[in-house]
Every structure is written in structure tokens, then in C-alpha cells.
Image: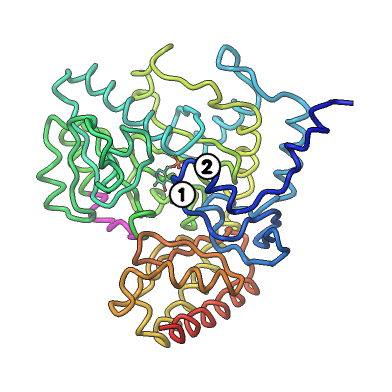
Amino acid sequence: MNAKLDSGVTTRPVTRQTFDDVLVPTYAPAAMVPVRASGLDLWDQSGKHYLDFTAGIAVTSLGHGHPLLVDALTRQINTLWHLGNGYTNEPVLRLALALTEATFADRAFFCNSGAEANEAALKLARKYAHTKFGPHKSRIVSCLASFHGRTLFTVSVGGQPKYTEGFEPLPQEINHIPYNDIACARAAITDDVAAVIVEPIQGEGGVVPGDPAFLKALRERCDETGALLIFDEVQSGVGRTGALYAYMECGVTPDILTSAKALGNGYPIGAMLTTATIAEHFNVGSHGTTYGGNPLAATVALNVLDTINTPSFLARVKQASAQIFANLTKLAADYPQLFGKVRGSGLLIGLPVAETFAGRAKDFTKAAESLGLMLLIAGPGVIRLAPALIVSDAQIAEADRIMRGAADAVLAAA
Ligand SMILES: *Cc1c(COP(=O)(O)O)cnc(C)c1O
């Protein structure tokens, strides 16, 4: 008998209070603690059921515990877990082939999160500019309200000052322009710019779709100045908008694309995709990570990609999206004192709160949670819906029913 199994540390009772007792307080998690989930169904410690319209922040796009992924991962777990980058492995080679065949890219770099994918993209862009044009070309242009991750570099590139306060000194040569402002973009992208980074649809910043004319203007100025255009598709990618990647439907091809979140359906993985010419500017030792492209993460991502990247799967995402947009439009019309105009793309949907309910999106998601529907916010003023892409018509109708109940509850409490 293994003495450790008898010690009780793996099975002792824990509660939400334990979080406050032993976790660094970087989050304020919900009062309920989820213990089990399948598809879009989730249960907490008390056995209460919830319909999950968060997908772990646009991550579990194939739902919780998808049988194909469980099966593929289980087989890989019983075969090979980890090697380190002194060796490659079959799953990561297949994943790189699949991603480069499916996109503009010829080369892939793997890491473990969205922030790391963006960190790699920004470092590659700096290296490319320094080698090709000289060290003066180092400026990075990004958008206000953007979100690119929490490493010191990516959080400084992100356009939300509240996330960098107290962490100074910050990396230098970073400028922020208003999202969708073409004139500002033209003025800001000067000859000393190494990279422009943009979310084709801003997620954390409030679910704000990028104007195709703005994205095209970024592409034009990058071409004129030799800057690289980076699309951060960490949230918008892997089928979320109804295209495999959002760039495929906005008429603009980036030089570097970053992907994470849904790529692993909850198994941590990040990817940076780029062209062969740009990738050449990284060489052996330029960049790396211990876990990047490990066989477990690569196996899951390969199966995620294979499932999502089919015309019928993506067509269903658009169909589900149209139904939710119709429901939310009607909801907003019925409760004008609570909601504004629905926006977003595919199954990344934002419902801004009305003036009279300003800053209280969380009050609404809490009311929905108590009625059994998990929702997200995107800033204090926007309710965000990001259900798994496999959401059914019946689940869409159920979410609508609960949101109406939550609206009534919030109004009754006011
Ligand atoms: C979530 C997110 C990130 C950061 O990803 P992590 O995996 O949390 O590091 C970066 N960019 C965008 C657009 C995101 O939505």
C-alpha cells in the first residue's frame, strides 16, 4: 500500500472558502464550485445543474468531456506524455501539418497559452525587424481596450492600463490607438513600427467586432512600412466565429497569427503561426518552452481541429449564432431598461447593458447563475455568451428562457 494514498490529502473536503484561505487572490470565483461536466451540462458540489454558456471562457468549444477527445487523450496518456524539445513527436508533427494546411501559414511554434503565443509573436516580429531593417524599427502598435495576455510584455501591449498599474517599468516603444479608427492607425504606423497586433474581434474588451475597412487599413500600412501584422485569434479562432479563423472572412491575411483557448478544448496549448520567410528569423535557441508541443496537448489539438474544421460543423455554428442573435434582439426589445444592442460574431456574442443598468453586467450573470445558466461578462458593461460550438437548439431555447427569468429577477430586486 502506498502510504500517500492513506494520508487523505487527495480526498479531504474543500469548499469555496478554501480558495480564500490558500490561493493568491488574483480571481474572485463564483460561490459554487463545479465538480463535473459533460457537453454543456455542469454540476456543482451540491449537485445543482447548470447550462454552461461560458465554455471556460471560449475554450471548451466541443463541450466538456467530448468522447473523441477523451478517447484520443487517454490513448496518448497510455503511450507517451513528455519529451522536452530535444526530441520531436508524431502528434506535434501531424498538428503542424494540419494547421499549416488549413491556414496561410507555413510554420508553427507551440507553447502553452495565449499569452505565450503572443509573446512569441511579438518577439519574432522584433527579431525580424531588427535583422531586416535595424534596431530603430522596434515600435509596436496595438489597440486600446485590447487584451493579449498577462506576461509583462503582452500585458503592456494590451490596451487596458488597469492591468499594468503597479508593474512599471514596462517594456518600451508601445503605442495604443483606438480600435477601428483608420485615421489614427495610418498616423501611428510609421517606419519605425515592427509590428501591429490586433484582435479581429475584441473579446475581453467588450466583444467588439473589427471593422473590415480598419483591418484592411492596418494591412496596407504594414505593407507600406514593412511592419508585420499580427492577428491575435486566441479567442476568435478555432471555429468560434463560424470560420476556422476570423481572418478567413475579413479579407485580410496577417503575417503572424496566434491561437490558444479552444485549440486544446481545455488542455493547455498555444500556437503561433507564420510564413516560412518570417519564421527563418528565429533559429535554434532564439525562443522556446519546455512543454510546447508536448504529445498530450498536440493530440488533443489535432482532434479538435479535425472535428471543427469541416464545412458542416462551421455552418452549424453560424446557424446557432443566428438563433441566439434573434433571441437576444427580442430580449433586448422586451427589456430596454436592461439591455442594449447585441453584437459579436458567430458564438462570441456580447449583450451590452443599457444606460440605466450601467456597469452592472455582473448582477445579471449572477441572477442567471442562480437560475442555472452560466454566462460571462466582458468588462462591467457587457454580458458575454460563448457557449460550446456544439450547443443544441434546445439548449439555446433553455438559455433564452433562463435569461428572461434573470431579467425579471434583476428588475424585481431593483
Ligand atoms: C485569453 C486571451 C489571451 C490570453 O490567453 P491566456 O491563455 O490566458 O494566456 C490573449 N489574447 C486574447 C485575445 C485572449 O482572449
Asked if residue 204 lies left or right of residue 227, the reply is right
Quadrant of residue 5 in the image?
top right
Residue farthest along the right direction in this orientation? 1
- Tell me the residue at 16%/25% (across/down): 137
Q: Residue furthest left?
A: 187
Q: Position of residue 288 (x, y in %)?
A: 46, 20
| The magenta segment | 207-216
Instruction: Using a 10 Å C-alpha cutoff, classify the residue at mark 1 as few (fewer than 14 neighbours), some (14 to 19) or many (20 or more).
Output: few
Q: Which residue is mark 2?
A: 23
Gap in Å between the C-alphas at discs 2 and 1? 9 Å
The image shows residue 302, relative to residue 39, as above or below, that is above
The 10 Å Cα crowd at callout 2, few under 14, some 14 to 19, many 20 or more, is few
Q: Are marks 2 and 1 in contact (CB under 8 Å)?
A: yes
Percent of width and height locating residue 233 = 41, 45
Residue 276 placement: quadrant: top left
Badge 1 element = loop
Amino acid on which disc 1 is placed:
Tyr
In x, y percent, where is residue 298?
61, 32
Residue at x 20%, y 36% (from the top left corner): 174
Q: Is residue 239 above or below residue 110?
A: below
Q: Which residue is mark 1?
A: 27
Discs 2/1, front: 2
- Image position of 49 (left or right of 173): right
Which numbered dot is residue 154? none
**Observer able to see residue 315:** no
